[in-house]
Image (cartoon, grey):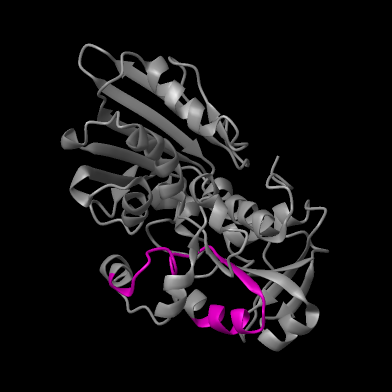
Amino acid sequence: MKAGIVGYRGYSGAELVRILEKHPGVEPVLLEHRAEGGAPCPLLHPTGPQTLPCDPEIIKAEGLAVVFLATPPEVSMDLAPALLAVGTRVVDLSGAFRLGTPANYTAWYKAEHTQPDLLAEAVYGLPEFCRERIPAARLISNPGCYPTAANLAIRPLIDAGVIDRTAGIVCDAKSGVSGAGRKPSLTTSFCEVTENFSAYSILKHRHVPEVLMIAGLEEREFSFTAQLLPIDRGILETIYFRATGVKSADDLIAIYDRRYRNEPFVRLFVPGRVPDLHGVARTNLCDIGVTYDAATGRAVVISAIDNLVKGAAGQAVQNMNLMLGFPETEALL
């Protein structure tokens, strides 16, 4: 099957090409959506995949089964309707279709949503919690990188009722610079980032509503701060809360084990051990570790992913595998 990639010059788009070139059932096709074109992405192999214009009729004629949109939200909203109209399924890596209603989108993205019908139709693509809806979907909204790590860590504990929600949950999240995209900016330039560590979008990060939506939290229960690490890739989130109804870290790990025992991309650490970024780099894995103080009820969960793989391109391929009937782990393990 042929799979198109729009935005292949960006970090997530280039990662899609890298993964799909290993996929035995898929031929990647690069789709150029900008009239001015541009220089080939240096991250791509010089003898890489076929390149075509991002024209719906050409895409239909070429028989592309799916198109990945590794584009800004406004570009995804512009391209998705025509692609779906010619029968091509879409996996969107932007935030264009994640939040369910135009009002939610406007509140967090500070812009009008131009495709409310597609927003209502889109299926949120976090397979560990939304798997049953993904195979039949026309349009998948790939989760944000921060919410992927947060929801995989928080949702099982919320479901089990072991978090004291009156005490709140604090998520201290750090990401590599590639999470900001490839477009040059002062804040992500070398001299600003190197030997530095900074917080941004405090209390107003646009990924917060995805955590609230999937974990089932109210905004007042969840405090999130994003921080920029002077590294190229990776997300590590330190999540603090008060636990209730458990006696040890083993009890918390047992909750995760029951939920994720058959999930191929979630790895659990024994109590006393916690993940780091080296362990998940260039993988589609999410690593989770727990520390718990029984005397005070304080609990800390560490959740780590690669923001370009499980946080973007890898999870997008995981969704594609489910949509097109491939083994879910194809090209990802």
Image quadrant in which the C terminus is located: top right
Residue at 67% over, 85% down: 56
**Relative horizontal placement of residue 134, taking residue 227 as reference (left or right):** right
**Relative horizontal placement of residue 294, taking residue 143 as reference (left or right):** left
Residue at 66% over, 60% down: 323
| Residue 226 drawn at (x, y percent) | 33, 47
Q: Which residues are magenta?
A: 78-103
| Residue 246 drawn at (x, y percent) | 31, 18
Residue at 42% over, 51% down: 191
| Residue 193 drawn at (x, y percent) | 41, 48
Q: Is residue 229 visible?
A: no
Instruction: Decide whether residue 82 is among the magenta residues.
Output: yes
| Residue 222 drawn at (x, y percent) | 24, 44
Count of picture labels: 0
Image quadrant in which the N terminus is located: bottom right
Looking at the picture, tell me which residue is in the foreground, 232 or 115.
115
Residue at 24% over, 51% down: 202
Instruction: Decide whether residue 142 is among the magenta residues.
Output: no
Q: Vertically, is 107 above or below 205?
A: below
Q: Is residue 135 visible?
A: yes
Looking at the picture, tell me which residue is in the foreground, 159 or 49.
159
Q: Vertically, is 183 above or below 240?
A: below
Looking at the picture, tell me which residue is in the foreground, 179 or 59.
59
